[in-house]
């Protein structure tokens, strides 16, 4: 009986405590995450102009997006950005991390330098690089190319050069973060594996190929899909460097979403914007599922 | 290059230089000779051919990192105090012809960078408070109090990780424009800029997992002594959580300082905008040397912040989360 009484106040306390501690999460996630997610599905089948009540329009928004001649351009450009980012941006952090993991002295300095661009605000980085990309022969990069007899390159002003220029800057800005992830994974390579490989007569290249890289395989598969998901949503670089130009050569899907919803002249079409975001999210979901199905066999 | 050549034959263990802290080297097994084991063996490193190749590779990498990663920032620092004509004519001059410290003052005062700087500080501070509050209270409930239904809630939180940010942009804007129940309009307020940052499933997962690993005996002992939920939180759990609070803090502040898309959408009023949103507009109408000074001011704080808290950034605090 006394034991029961002694429990009483605590039970009261423990019923208030969880509620109080749950409130911040419920409020913030409810308002700014769960509700908007639900809402995006509702909005994609509605016509909203924020003045009159929203009107159900079925799949009209999706149809309007699919009929937009710019959609093909945007999808192609986004895919091109993702492919270039894979070719240019994916191997760089891997190579850096593998070499850095074998540095004996001042390794911290190496990772400090590699991570430095990551902390530069992206808007600052883009404005700085926009100056570097000056197409005149006196531009910074063109001057450097001039020393070795190359260039001048029209960088951002030419439709075929614009996208690689964007990818180059994006790689500079993001590689450091991935290097740190790889380095952390490389710490856990069991030393015995290297010892064993040496006993079997493996040289340095063979050890990297047969021990180091296989150890990273799981994390490489994840960084690969995360990179694809990230680059499919690229917005800041095309928005700030070229605003989709020249000649729509850098118009990406997310830039199209932004233009549907917020651009000064054509904006305000929130239904179309949500429909396109959902289509992109759906495509990424399908891609991820297929990717993990296909790679499951290789990952462990 | 000569100093680099001297570095490589490391036959005896050398004292760790100041900067080499971040990587958890102490977890590496040390071999009989007292060295840590990496790809190359001590024997291989003694071979002349390997020694030269490694020197070239490591030295080359260092030179590359200095030029590629530090170079643009040093260039910015130089050009921020160089007159426009100098920068345009000799963009790669190593030293400015004439120094123009006035640029920094012009940027700070005359194009009103100080206003946007303080806007950024307010948003970063608000974002930090929101993210900490949500992550720590949620982690505490989900890991330690565990009321009925908390597993479902945790699943709902984690599920948001799989929703790409692009889906949220427009519906989140419309939500902030007209908040459910209260009908508050948070557009053009700092609240609208930083409150949504609190909905970070990554933070909640990080803190919950940290709390999961706290010693249960201490918590049980406090419970037996009659410690209530609130005292347990403030006097037992929080004091033990400094490492994870540090990680959440530095990433929260840096992310807020770097954020661009959300403040661009939610703060159309120029007087409320943070640096990253305002800079592109300013750059279009301002003289180059002042723009470069403004860029330097805008990235100075995050860089100093990074240098101070480098251990938290560089030890790969994300590895567990990414491995999943």
Image (cartoon, coloured by chain):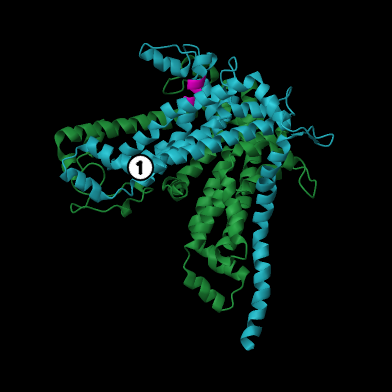
**For this rendering, which residue is in front, A172 or A22?**
A22
**Does B222 appear above or below A270?**
below
Residue at 54% across / 27% down in the picture? Answer: A126
Q: Is residue B98 left or right of residue B51?
A: right
Q: Is residue B81 visible?
A: no
Q: Which residue is mark 1?
A: A216
Label 1: chain letter: A
**The furthest residue to the right:** A52
**Residue B163 at x, y percent in the picture:** 59, 42
Total labels drawn: 1
Q: Tell me the colour chain B is drawn in.
A: green
> Label 1's element?
helix
**For this rendering, which residue is in front, B92 or A200?**
A200
Q: In what quadrant of the picture does the N terminus of chain B appear?
A: top left
Q: Is residue A61 left or right of residue B46?
A: right
**For this rendering, which residue is in front, B237 or B309?**
B237
Q: Is residue A231 left or right of residue B54?
A: right
**Magenta span dominant secondary structure:** helix
Magenta segment: A163-169
**Residue B284 at x, y percent in the picture:** 63, 21
Residue at 54% across / 22% down in the picture? Answer: A77
**Does A266 appear above or below B13?**
above
Based on the picture, tell me whether residue B262 belongs to the magenta stretch.
no
Q: Is residue A156 visible?
A: yes
Res. B283 image quadrant: top right
Based on the picture, tell me whether residue A164 belongs to the magenta stretch.
yes
**For this rendering, which residue is in front, A110 or B39?**
B39
Q: Tell me the colour chain A is drawn in.
A: cyan
Residue at 67% across / 55% down in the picture? Answer: A26
**Residue A181 at x, y percent in the picture:** 41, 43
Res. B255 image quadrant: top right
Q: Residues within 10 Å of mark 1 (few under 14, many from 20)?
A: some
């Amino acid at each position: 009986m006394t034991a029961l009484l002694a429990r009483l106040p605590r039970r009261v306390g423990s019923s208030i405590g969880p509620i109080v501690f749950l409130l911040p999460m419920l409020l913030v996630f409810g308002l700014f995450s769960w509700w908007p997610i639900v809402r995006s599905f509702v909005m994609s089948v509605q016509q909203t102009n924020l003045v009159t009540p929203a009107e159900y329009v079925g799949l009209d928004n999706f149809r309007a997006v699919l009929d937009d001649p710019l959609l093909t351009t945007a999808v192609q450009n986004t895919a091109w950005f993702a492919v270039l980012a894979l070719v240019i941006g994916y191997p760089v952090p891997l190579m850096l991390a593998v070499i850095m993991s074998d540095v004996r002295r001042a390794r911290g300095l190496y990772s400090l330098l590699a991570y430095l661009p990551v902390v530069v605000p992206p808007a600052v980085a883009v404005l700085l690089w926009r100056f570097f990309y000056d197409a005149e022969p006196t531009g910074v990069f063109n001057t450097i190319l001039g020393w070795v007899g190359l260039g001048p390159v029209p960088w951002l002003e030419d439709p075929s050069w614009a996208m690689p220029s964007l990818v180059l800057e994006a790689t500079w800005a993001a590689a450091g973060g991935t290097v740190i992830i790889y380095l952390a994974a490389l710490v856990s390579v069991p030393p015995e594996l290297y010892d064993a490989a040496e006993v079997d007569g493996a040289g340095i290249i063979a050890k990297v190929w047969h021990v180091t890289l296989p150890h990273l395989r799981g994390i490489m598969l994840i960084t690969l899909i995360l990179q694809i998901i990230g680059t499919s949503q690229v917005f800041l670089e095309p928005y700030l460097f070229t605003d989709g130009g020249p000649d729509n050569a850098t118009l990406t899907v997310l830039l199209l979403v932004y233009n549907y919803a917020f651009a000064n002249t054509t904006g305000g079409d929130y239904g179309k914007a949500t429909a396109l975001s959902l289509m992109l999210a759906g495509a990424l979901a399908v891609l991820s599922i297929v990717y993990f199905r296909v790679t499951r066999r290789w990952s462990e | 290059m000569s100093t680099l050549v001297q570095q490589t034959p490391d036959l005896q263990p050398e004292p760790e230089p100041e900067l080499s802290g971040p990587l958890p080297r102490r977890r590496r097994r040390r071999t009989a000779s007292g060295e840590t084991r990496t790809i190359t063996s001590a024997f291989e490193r003694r071979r002349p051919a390997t020694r030269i190749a490694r020197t070239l590779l490591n030295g080359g990498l260092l030179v590359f990192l200095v030029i590629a990663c530090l170079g643009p920032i040093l260039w910015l620092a130089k050009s921020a105090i160089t007159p426009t004509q100098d920068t345009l004519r000799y963009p790669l001059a190593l030293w400015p012809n004439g120094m123009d410290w006035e640029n920094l003052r012009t940027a700070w005062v005359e194009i009103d960078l100080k206003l946007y700087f303080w806007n950024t500080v307010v948003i970063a501070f608000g974002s930090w408070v929101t993210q900490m509050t949500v992550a720590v209270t949620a982690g505490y409930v989900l890991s330690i109090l565990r009321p009925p239904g908390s597993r479902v809630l945790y699943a709902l939180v984690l599920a948001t990780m799989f929703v790409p940010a692009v889906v949220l942009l427009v519906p989140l804007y419309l939500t902030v424009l007209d908040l459910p129940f209260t009908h508050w309009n948070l557009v053009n307020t700092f609240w609208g800029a930083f409150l949504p940052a609190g909905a970070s499933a990554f933070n909640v997962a990080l803190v919950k997992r940290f709390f999961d690993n706290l010693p249960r005996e201490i918590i049980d002992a406090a419970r037996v002594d009659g410690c209530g939920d609130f005292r347990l939180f403030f006097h037992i759990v929080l004091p033990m959580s400094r490492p994870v609070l540090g990680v959440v803090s530095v990433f929260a502040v840096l992310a807020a300082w770097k954020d661009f898309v959300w403040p661009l959408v939610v703060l159309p009023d120029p007087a409320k905008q943070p640096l990253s949103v305002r800079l592109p507009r300013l750059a279009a109408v301002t003289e180059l040397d002042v723009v470069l000074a403004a860029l330097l001011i805008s990235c100075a704080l995050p860089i100093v912040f990074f240098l101070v808290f480098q251990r938290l950034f560089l030890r790969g605090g994300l590895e567990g989360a990414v491995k999943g």
